[in-house]
Image: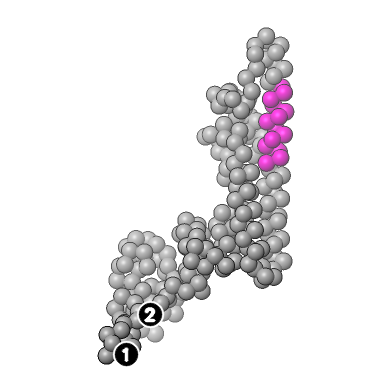
Amino acid sequence: MPLVPAKCPNCGASLTLDPVTRAAVCPYCQTPFVVEDAVNNYNIQNTVRVEHLHTDKVEIQDSGSAESLLKTANTYLSLNNYISARYDFEEITKKFPYEWRAWWGLIETETEKFTRSAKYFYTPEQPNHMLHNKIGEHLNKLDSLFNMVEKFENGSLGAEKRHAYKTYVDNMKAADDRRRALIDSHTKELRTAYEQMGVRFIVFSQTRNIWAMPCFRRLYTKFLDP
């Protein structure tokens, strides 16, 4: 099949593509895109459909439907381009707030298709972040998104997706419970040690410098490798 003219949806570069291919990457800006959208982008910019010529009325073909936008966003998601996928899904929720698949897409981008673990939120370079309820904030955001999914999906979500979501949330809750338990346990140990030395104990939440101590780096290691 011959190549067809197209324009990159991101940078507008002129391209020639195989229409049989579903997705490609722009050689100029390195942005992945749906081939059909790039071809439509070229057609919109280079052709118009004229109706009622005597009134000079010109109508430009519309490619901004929910289905077209979802197709683009899901292509980014399949390529693990979570930044672009998130942007497109958010745009869909603004234009079509009743489109539950866009809300579900945001859940999949936030969880990186349910592959994130506690290591994503807490890193060895910044162990003091364990003081912050980052997992709780993440779960609160997911809960808001899932509420929107349930509001509009009308039974279309399916048991498999519900199970994937519930399993991910349960695992994250378990990790956060373990984080809290480790901090509480170590707080008590430190309080006792400080009191034995006759030094007034400083509560964790009031300082970050205490996390520079080697014992807290060991605590962080325990959290990641229980």
User: From the viewer's perspective, is residue 172 above or below residue 22?
Assistant: above
Image quadrant containing the N terminus? bottom left
Dominant SS of magenta comes to helix
Q: Where is residue 69 drawn, in percent x and y?
A: 48, 70
Of the numbered discs 1 and 2, the one sitting upstream in the chain is 1
Are the two marked residues, 1 and 2, in contact with CB atoms closer than 8 angstroms? no
Identify which residue, 213 or 106, lies in the foreground. Answer: 106
Task: Tell me the element at label 2.
Answer: loop
Image quadrant containing the C terminus? top right
Please name which of the two marks, 1 or 2, marks the residue nearer to the observer: 1
Q: Which mark is residue 204?
A: none
- Residue wearing tag 1: 52
Q: Point out the stretch of residues depicted in magenta.
A: 176-189
Residue at image coords 68%, 41%: 176
Residue at image coords 69%, 19%: 191
Kind of residue at badge 2: Gln
Residue at image coords 36%, 74%: 41
- Residue wearing tag 2: 61
Task: Tell me the element at label 1.
Answer: loop
Numbered disc total: 2
Q: Quadrant of residue 97?
A: bottom right
